[in-house]
Amino acid sequence: MALTETTFDANASGSKGAPALHTYETADSWATIEGAGYFTGLYTVLKDGDMIFIHSTNTAAGGQRTYQVRRETTTKVIQISQNGSPVYITSHITDVSTAGQIWIASPIEGRVTKVVSVLQGAIATADATLTVKDKDGNSMGTITIANSSSAAGDVDTLTPSAENFVEENDGIEIETDGGSTNTIEVKLIVEITPTIQ
């Protein structure tokens, strides 16, 4: 879908010099809304630093989020980013080649926006698959660590787009299927971006 200007409301105009606060309702998914240039049709309305409170009625992944506006003056494109700096949690799985799981806790309410794995040595026989889950066991997605030509320092990533909302102190499970061989540690970084559901 695309931007529907009739459901965009400039509530706090920013006429006194402060950034403006806008509200917007749409049935578009977060992936569509966060796509490059979604709000570019409002280039003459939006200013750098303005905030947009978005209510998505999308049946698959709706809710509410707040974004900050950045105007690209050369390309005349509007970019948005979620309000607040991401928090990073580090952990590790001692042996990626043995089936099992670890749990970490989110210190904030937000969305798991990225998971990074860093292999600490070569694995063999088969790939190892990591599954990232919310506290209720719903999968956010998987990371495949390839055994072919594997070596210390191999990096793999996951960018979750579903089941990735966490509340403060919620558990996040990271599971290995133990499909590979060799006793190799994998380091993990979990990025959580502050937002509201």
Image (spheres, rainbow, N blue to C red):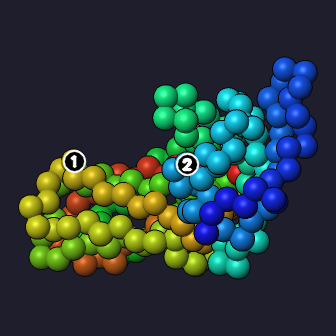
- Residue 194 in the image, given as x and y percentages of width and height: 67, 47
- Residue 81 in the image, given as x and y percentages of width and height: 61, 43
**Residue 37: numbered disc:** 2
Q: Is mark 2 on a helix, strand or loop?
A: loop
- Residue 70 in the image, given as x and y percentages of width and height: 61, 34
Q: Residue shown at 66%/72% (left/top)?
A: 61
Image-based side of 126 in relation to 68, left or right: left
Choose between 143 and 26: the one closer to the eye. 26
Q: Let me know if residue 100 appears in the view.
A: yes
* Crowd rating for badge 2 (residues with CA inside 10 Å; few <14, some 14–19, many 20+): some
Rendered-image quadrant of the N terminus: bottom right
* Crowd rating for badge 1 (residues with CA inside 10 Å; few <14, some 14–19, many 20+): some
Image-based side of 110 in relation to 32, left or right: right
Choose between 58 and 123: the one closer to the eye. 58
Image-based side of 145 in relation to 132, left or right: left
Q: In this view, does 109 lie above or below 124?
A: above
Q: How far apart are marks 1 and 2 (CA)?
A: 35 Å
Q: In this view, does 188 lie above or below 134?
A: above
The residue type indicated by label 1 comes to Gly
**Residue 48: numbered disc:** none
For marks 1 and 2, give the one nearer the viewer. 2
State the count of labels. 2
Q: Give residue 112's quadrant in the image.
A: bottom right
The residue type indicated by label 2 comes to Gly
Q: Residue furthest top?
A: 17
Quick one: label 1 or label 2, which is nearer the N terminus? 2
Q: Give residue 149's quadrant in the image.
A: bottom left
Q: Is mark 1 on a helix, strand or loop?
A: loop
Q: Let me know if residue 169 appears in the view.
A: no
Q: Residue shown at 84%/20% (left/top)?
A: 17
Question: For mark 1, what is the residue?
Answer: 153
Rendered-image quadrant of the C terminus: bottom right
